[in-house]
Amino acid sequence: PWSPLRGGWLSGKYHRGMAAPVEGTRIGAAEKAGWSESWTKYATERTWTVLDTLHAIAGETGKSPAQVALNWLLQRPGITAPIIGARSLAHFEDNLGAVGWSLTPDQVQRLTTAGDTDLPYPYDFITRAAWGEVWTRPHYDERTRRVLVIGTMLALDKWDEFRMHVRAALTEG
């Protein structure tokens, strides 16, 4: 992934209670230029919760917050090589300290939970549908349930299940 330290937010420079970005940092530049990782956009309760958890785990492991964040990312399924953007040799060397050790399963879960967000529509609907929370409602007739099942299978890229439901719908007339 690109910018695994979120433009510097996860570097260790930011803590709950700060009122403005650190001068001379990317977050400060982002605020002035209107970039996506700006202070205005990310100085939120969710960010402070993530940073609180990140700093706590950094303290537990004796690693820097940046190392903890990168190590967590490397333990995520499907991640092979985060694209770091170190601004100095010291940042680069610190980032290299993210390998050769692992967070505990509990630490991984705490960071994952801290960073979880609510899915926007339609993904929230698709997720609920995938777990049966939508089409098992009694007020949906069979045709509506089948349409929901087919739509969910398409959205979740489950083509075999999709074909099965389409065949069933076609044979029922």
Image (cartoon, helix red, strand yellow):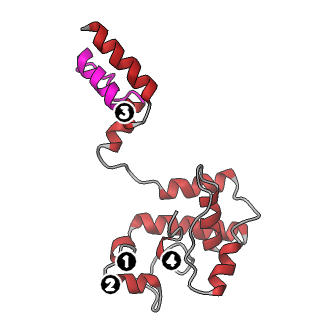
Q: Is residue 35 above or below residue 154?
A: below
Question: Callout 2 environment at 10 Å: few (<14), some (14 to 19), or many (20+)?
Answer: few
Question: Callout 1 environment at 10 Å: few (<14), some (14 to 19), or many (20+)?
Answer: many
Is residue 148 on the magenta stretch?
A: yes
* The C terminus - image quarter: top left
Rendered image quadrant of residue 163: top left
Q: Which residue is mark 3?
A: 154
Is residue 21 on the magenta stretch?
A: no
Q: CA distance from mark 3 to mark 4?
A: 37 Å
Q: Are marks 1 and 2 in contact (CB under 8 Å)?
A: yes
Q: Amino acid at mark 4?
A: Gly
Comparing labels 2 and 3, the label whose residue is closer to the camera: 3
Residue at 63% from the left image edge and 59% from the top image edge: 74
Q: CA distance from mark 3 to mark 1?
A: 36 Å
Label number found at residue 38 = 1
Q: Which residue is mark 4?
A: 8
Q: CA distance from mark 2 to mark 3?
A: 40 Å
SS type, badge 1: loop
Comparing labels 3 and 4, the label whose residue is closer to the camera: 3
Report if residue 129 is visible in the image: no
Comparing labels 4 and 2, the label whose residue is closer to the camera: 2
Q: Which residues make up the magenta segment? A: 131-152
Q: Amino acid at mark 2?
A: Ala
Q: Amino acid at mark 3?
A: Leu
Q: Amino acid at mark 1?
A: Ser
Residue at 58% from the left image edge and 50% from the top image edge: 78
Between 65 and 26, which is closer to the camera in this rendering? 26
- N-term mark: 3 or 1: 1
Question: Callout 4 environment at 10 Å: few (<14), some (14 to 19), or many (20+)?
Answer: some
Q: Are marks 4 and 2 in contact (CB under 8 Å)?
A: no
